[in-house]
């Protein structure tokens, strides 16, 4: 009886560990590796015998993190000072958030500049606004590049768009043609570093 109870306790611990990791991977759009590991761990937990130990899910279901090259790491969502959130929809799909240095120079002109790694893709964005005079919507030009060691790079330069600027950052959507004739489209939002 005690052996059966211990086996059920271990199974419950494994399922709870898998369920705890699942919401973290949901915060990281595109984190397919972590989601696959959670599914595999959950499937393994439900189909194995009582010899499974509680340590197995820890080895097979890591906490969801995006690959971090260049010293940047994935953040947990749109947020505080020094963050960049992107959603690239064409010609590849890359969506997520990274805590990184976001330079926002204000004066008569507004210039935002940021770069970070999101799910293995290096994303760089620069936004320029002339005749800046505080929070509001402005005509802007944006330069965006995205690529990884196996896909891209895709880049557009000086694409005209409309940017919404707040006291702490901004956001915009863009669509443009790369030099190779591919359409690079998506949206970015940023929060300036303190």
Image (spheres, rainbow, N blue to C red):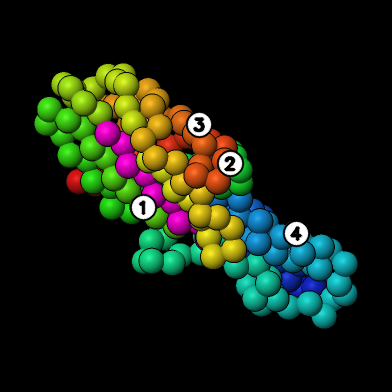
The residue carrying pointer 1 sits among few (fewer than 14), some (14 to 19) or many (20 or more) residues within 10 Å by Cα, namely many
Q: Secondary structure at mark 3?
A: strand
Q: Position of residue 173 (x, y in %)?
A: 46, 29
Residue designated by label 4: 39
- How far is disc 3 from disc 2 in space, using C-alphas? 10 Å
| Quarter of the image where one finds residue 37 | bottom right
Number of the front mark, 4 or 1 = 1
Q: CA distance from mark 2 to mark 4?
A: 35 Å
What stretch of residues is rendered in magenta?
118-128
Q: Which mark is residue 182?
A: 2
CA gap between label 4 and label 1 equals 32 Å
**Drawn side of residue 85 relative to residue 92, left or right:** left
Q: Is residue 120 magenta?
A: yes
| CB-based contact (under 8 Å), mark 1 and mark 3 | no
Q: CA distance from mark 4 to mark 3?
A: 35 Å
- What is the secondary structure assignment of the residue under circle 2? loop
The single residue placed furthest to the front in the displayed view is 180
Q: Earlier in the sequence, mark 4 or mark 3?
A: 4
For the residues labelled 1 and 3, the Cα–Cα distance comes to 19 Å
- Do residues under tags 2 and 4 come within 8 Å of each other at their CB atoms? no
């Amino acid at each position: 009886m005690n052996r059966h109870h211990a086996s059920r306790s271990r199974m419950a611990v494994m399922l709870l560990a898998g369920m705890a990791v699942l919401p973290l991977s949901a915060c990281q759009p595109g984190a397919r590796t972590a989601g696959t590991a959670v599914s595999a761990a959950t499937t393994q937990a439900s189909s194995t015998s009582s010899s499974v130990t509680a340590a197995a899910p820890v080895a097979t279901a890591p906490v969801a993190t995006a690959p971090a090259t260049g010293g940047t790491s994935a953040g947990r969502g749109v947020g505080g000072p020094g963050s960049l959130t992107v959603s690239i929809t064409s010609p590849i799909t890359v969506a997520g958030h990274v805590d990184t240095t976001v330079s926002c120079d204000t004066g008569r002109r507004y210039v935002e500049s940021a770069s970070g790694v999101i799910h293995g893709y290096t994303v760089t964005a620069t936004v320029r606004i002339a005749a800046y005079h505080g929070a509001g919507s402005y005509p802007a030009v944006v330069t965006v590049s995205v690529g990884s060691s196996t896909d891209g790079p895709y880049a557009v330069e000086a694409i005209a768009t409309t940017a919404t600027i707040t006291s702490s950052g901004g956001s915009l959507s863009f669509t443009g043609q790369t030099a190779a004739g591919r359409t690079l489209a998506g949206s970015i939002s940023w929060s300036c570093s303190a």
